[in-house]
Image: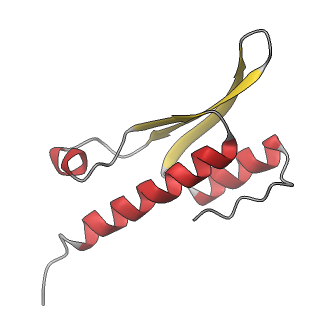
Amino acid sequence: MSNWSPSAQPLDLLDMLRTTYSGWQIYCHTTGLRGAEQWNAARRAKDTEQSQRAGILQHVEKDSGQFLADALAEQVILIHSNAADHWPTP
């Protein structure tokens, strides 16, 4: 679940996403004649076999900031779940 708000302006949302998901390089640009937004995030961490098996993506592309926020929230859950599985046991 993301902390995105429908009242957030695109630049405010971009700033919020960059702050919240600092492990990702996030950017937004417009495409085509109608100026459709394209929201992208590239994971800063190196891709590994373990992260691929866990379903962790290196790149996420969505048509809106809200959809990107939701997708990144899901990715963070996968990342943290995967990391917790590999902590040394006492």
Q: Position of residue 58 (x, y in %)?
A: 37, 39
Q: How many marks?
A: 0
Location of the N terminus (image quadrant): bottom right
Q: Is residue 62 left or right of residue 5?
A: left
**Residue at 41% from the left image edge and 64% from the top image edge:** 77
Q: From what the image shows, is residue 71 above or below residue 87?
A: above
Locate residue 40: give its quadrant: top right
Q: Position of residue 17 (x, y in %)?
A: 65, 51
**Residue at 30% from the left image edge and 42% from the top image edge:** 46
Does the image show residue 22? no
Location of the C terminus (image quadrant): bottom left
Locate residue 36: give its quadrant: top right
**Residue at 61% from the left image edge and 59% from the top image edge:** 20
Q: How is the image coloured?
A: secondary structure
Residue furthest top as drawn: 33
Locate residue 14: give its quadrant: top right
Q: From what the image shows, is residue 5 above or below residue 90?
A: above
Q: Is residue 60 left or right of residue 54?
A: right
| Nearer-the-camera pick, 64 or 25 | 64
Q: Position of residue 30 (x, y in %)?
A: 73, 21
Q: Position of residue 15 (x, y in %)?
A: 73, 49
Q: From what the image shows, is residue 29 above or below residue 56?
A: above
| Nearer-the-camera pick, 82 or 64 | 64
Does the image show residue 17? yes
**Residue at 54% from the left image edge and 40% from the top image edge:** 25
